[in-house]
Image (cartoon, grey):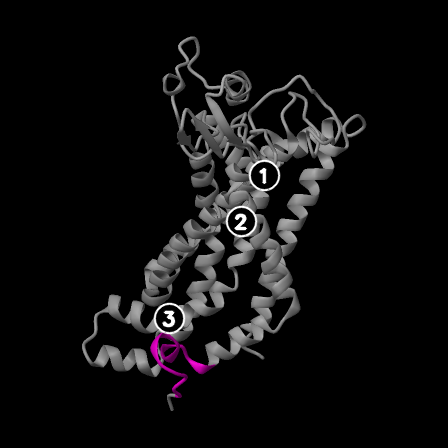
């Protein structure tokens, strides 16, 4: 019997699903995890506003500029001897003459690539978390590095789920020889030494770009999602409502997308936080080993590698990324554990 839960979109959600989501939000660890994750997500995705060597607002000769959010050429400010605008020098030189009447810099006035003369200095009012071996601000690199890690983790999750859902649904629904062949391919991928293969492929392709690294890791990581979905589809494809749809003349694609996937995806969605944290961890490990993203890309793994190398002379290089990475992974895993408990079919 169908129970009405209201109007609009809420009426389309089953009472069981609503109970599960209510159970999720009743858990304290769900709120702690979501709060920790959203805090890191919001600050890292808006890193230009919080940490940048360019001003957020600049009023010059009565015209407003937004250098932190928009790229301006040197010619815009009448600079002919350089292709790059040093906004600190520009504000300092033109404030006295009245050309620049207002300049608002971010709270942390450093970008992640800027090298200073303050090499390996500890935390101070100028550099909140100190500087690294090249004089770059650790707080800036940490904030931008978290954004790279989060972007990588989310794209890793989307790509793995996209491939896994397609392969798992087709494999489970049609079964037979297709299922047998696909299982052998998955077994082959699973027995490959993951890190060794990723490092080897990156070396052969002579590329350490964000997208190439993501593509290689995804091609070796979708198997678990596909296997989980295959098991769900196998248990659903012969149920009464699927048989009724076949008897009514519905095509296989319609049955899969209308009847099978909506009922098979719910348990798979509980793997989302763990997949994201797995992508973040993988990138950190690759960067730590030197086989991840190319320098000078801000990276948690690269900061951890520097921290290990200079642990006696500059412990802040290890403490900052370790605490940040631990905070992020714990927050995501708390959400995952809360989802798993709320959507557990035995409850």
Which image quadrant: the N terminus?
Answer: bottom left
Q: Position of residue 117 (x, y in %)?
A: 66, 17
Q: Secondary structure at mark 1?
A: helix
Q: Is residue 186 above or below residue 14?
A: above
Q: Point out the stretch of residues depicted in magenta.
A: 3-15
Q: Position of residue 50 (x, y in %)?
A: 56, 39
Q: Earlier in the sequence, mark 1 or mark 3?
A: 1
In the rendered structure, does residue 11 fall within the stretch colored magenta? yes
Q: Which mark is residue 231?
A: none
Q: Of residues 194 and 305, which is closer to you in this image?
A: 305
Q: Of residues 288 and 319, which is closer to you in this image?
A: 319
In the rendered structure, does residue 256 fall within the stretch colored magenta? no
Q: Quadrant of residue 72?
A: top left
Q: Which residue is mark 1?
A: 143
Q: Of residues 246 and 143, which is closer to you in this image?
A: 143
Q: Earlier in the sequence, mark 2 or mark 3?
A: 2
**Left or right: 294, with 255 as reference point:** right
Residue farthest to the top, as pictured: 81
Query: Residue placed at 52% from the left, 73% from the top?
Result: 21
Q: Which residue is mark 3?
A: 262
Packing grade of label 1 (10 A; few <14, some 14-19, many >=20) is many
């Amino acid at each position: 019997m169908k129970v009405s839960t209201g109007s609009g979109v809420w009426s389309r959600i089953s009472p069981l699903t609503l109970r599960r989501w209510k159970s999720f939000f009743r858990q304290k660890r769900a709120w702690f995890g979501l709060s920790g994750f959203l805090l890191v997500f919001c600050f890292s995705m808006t890193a230009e506003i919080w940490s940048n060597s360019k001003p957020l607002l600049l009023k010059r000769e009565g015209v407003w500029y937004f250098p932190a959010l928009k790229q301006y050429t040197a010619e815009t400010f009448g600079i002919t001897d350089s292709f790059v605008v040093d906004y600190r020098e520009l504000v300092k030189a033109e404030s006295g003459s009245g050309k620049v009447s207002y300049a608002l810099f971010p709270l942390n006035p450093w970008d992640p690539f800027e090298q200073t003369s303050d090499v390996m200095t500890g935390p101070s009012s100028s550099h909140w978390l100190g500087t690294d071996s090249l004089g770059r601000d650790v707080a800036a690199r940490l904030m931008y590095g978290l954004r790279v890690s989060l972007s990588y983790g989310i794209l890793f999750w989307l790509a793995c789920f996209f491939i896994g859902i397609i392969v798992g649904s087709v494999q489970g629904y049609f079964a037979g020889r297709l299922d047998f062949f696909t299982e052998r391919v998955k077994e082959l991928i699973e027995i490959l030494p993951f890190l060794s293969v990723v490092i080897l492929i990156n070396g052969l392709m002579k590329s350490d770009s964000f997208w190439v690294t993501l593509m290689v890791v995804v091609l070796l990581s979708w198997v678990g999602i596909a296997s989980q979905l295959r098991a769900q589809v196998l248990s659903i494809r012969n149920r009464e409502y699927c048989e009724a749809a076949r008897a009514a003349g519905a095509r296989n694609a319609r049955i899969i997308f209308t009847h099978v996937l909506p009922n098979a995806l719910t348990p798979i969605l509980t793997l989302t936080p763990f997949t994201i944290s797995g992508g973040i961890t993988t990138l950190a490990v690759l960067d730590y080993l030197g086989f991840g993203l190319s320098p000078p890309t801000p990276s948690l793994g690269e900061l951890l590698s520097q921290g290990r190398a200079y642990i006696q002379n500059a412990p802040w290089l290890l403490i900052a990324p370790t605490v940040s990475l631990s905070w992020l992974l714990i927050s995501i895993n708390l959400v995952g554990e809360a989802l798993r408990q709320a959507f557990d079919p035995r409850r």
